[in-house]
Image (spheres, grey):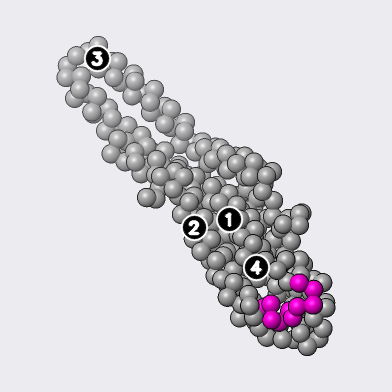
Amino acid sequence: MEDFVIDMLNAIGGGVDQTVVDTLLQAPSEYSASLYQLSLTVATVAVKPIAAIVLSIVFMLELARASQKADGDRELSVRLIGMIMIKLTLVLLAAQNADLMLKGIDEVGSSIMGGVTSVATTTGNADTLGLGDQMKDAVKDAGVFGQAACLVLLIIPFLVSKLAAIVFTVVVMLRFIQIYLMTAFNPLPIAFIACEETRQMGIGYFKSYASIVLQCVTLYLSVVMYRQMVSDVMKPDSFNKGDSLSGWVIGQFGNLLLASVLLIGVVAISNSVAKRWLGTEA
């Protein structure tokens, strides 16, 4: 029974399992190598031919536009056509290697994450221990009846915390699915960028991809801040030896429930912050 109480307090104070948090440190190719390879295969086999068709239409429109600007001026027409050919060659090369641009964004995200984890860790020091681990001695001293009372009192905050943990896990999994889906269509945005009328669509694609990659940084940092905030709110040091553990739980019941609900809010905020970094959300 003692272990049950400690585990429930850890779940309430920790918010989400550490193994889920650790997945945020993985690159898309590491999280699921098979899905990542599938997205690259789809991009090569199914999407690149469509991108080629779009680029051919863009090429013709650009050449027609150049001929109108030249208006019979041979020297100007040669200059314009030469500039267009260089531009379209660069665009074609970029479309063929669009996955390298996404990998570059992944590397930037990994670099930022490396800097964050070097100064903000979710494991390994007293400040980030679970709430139950910090109160282990108090739980032991409570005895069987005190522990049984705590089990009853903690059941609601515990269930809410598990619901919040499920929400967090789903968000992490959906983040990677979004990355794989966007990777599968990576040649098309380059083709859109080549055309003046659709340029913002292509730019918006890369901004959206970058915001998803950066969301792992904000999620990780949010967990670090959440766990520290929960520790401050719960104030396990406020429990003095000889106090009733069940009485302490009753006094902290609102904060215990708040800690679980807070995690859901943390997930929503971290997603919003990641978008605002790149101006994809007001």
Task: Say whether disc 2 or disc 3 marks the residue closer to the N-terminus.
Answer: 3
Spatial CA distance of label 1 from label 4 is: 18 Å
Q: Which residue is mark 3?
A: 76
Badge 1 is on which residue?
Answer: 222
Decide which of tag 1 and tag 4 comes sooner along the chain.
Answer: 1
Mark-to-mark CA distance, 4 and 3: 74 Å
- The structure residue drawn at horizontal position 52% and vertical position 55%, both measured from the top left corner, is 270
Front disc: 2 or 3: 2
Residue 227, placed above or below residue 102: below
- The answer to whether the residue labelled 4 contacts the one labelled 2, judged by CB atoms less than 8 Å apart, is no
In the displayed orientation, state which residue is furthest to the left: 71
Q: Residue at x 28, y 30 (%)?
A: 62
Q: Label 4 belongs to which residue?
A: 234
Give the residues in magenta. Answer: 240-249
- Residue 141 image position (x, y, % from top left): 83, 78
Dots 4, 3 in contact, CB < 8 A? no
Task: Using residue 1 as the reference point, say whether residue 176 is left or right of it.
Answer: left
- Is disc 1 in contact with disc 4, using a CB cutoff of under 8 Å? no
